[in-house]
Amino acid sequence: MNKQQELLVITMEECAELGQACSKIIRFNEDDVLDVDDACNLQNEVGDVLCMIELLKERGLIEEDKIQDRILEKRHKLTRWSNLFK
């Protein structure tokens, strides 16, 4: 496995771990209050994913300005198709 492949595999693994942390919060928290351990785990997993995103940028696989453009597009879509901004 070359370095790019390793970077992509680790990024996939970290994204999966973030998904698992989110899933556990939904499954095991009956109210909207996060358990301290769940909040810590969520924060750690987000940090791990952000680290991998930074490495993707450093290695030239993705570009910051294009990411920012996409963030704006996604936020716009969410204002229309979700209840997150209502």
Image (tube, helix red, strand yellow):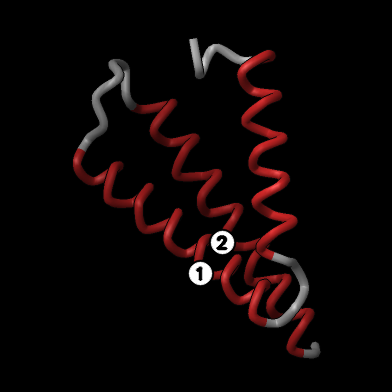
Dots 2, 1 in contact, CB < 8 A: yes
Q: Alpha-carbon neighbours of circle 1 within 10 Å: few (<14), some, or many (≥20)?
A: some
Residue 38 position by quadrant:
top left
Relative depth, front residue between 76 and 45: 76
Which residue is identified by label 2?
14
Question: Which callout, 2 or 1, points to the residue nearer the camera?
Answer: 1
Residue depicted at x 60% and y 52%:
16
Q: Secondary structure at mark 1?
A: helix
Which residue is identified by label 1?
51
User: The residue under label 1 is which amino acid type?
Assistant: Cys
Instruction: Tell me the distance, in whole angstroms, between the alpha carbons under discs 2 and 1.
Output: 10 Å
Residue depicted at x 28% and y 16%:
31
Q: Is residue 19 above or below residue 5?
A: above
Residue depicted at x 47% and y 38%:
22
User: The residue under label 2 is which amino acid type?
Assistant: Glu
Q: Earlier in the sequence, mark 2 or mark 1?
A: 2
| Residue 63: x %, y % from top left | 73, 66
| Residue 55: x %, y % from top left | 60, 76
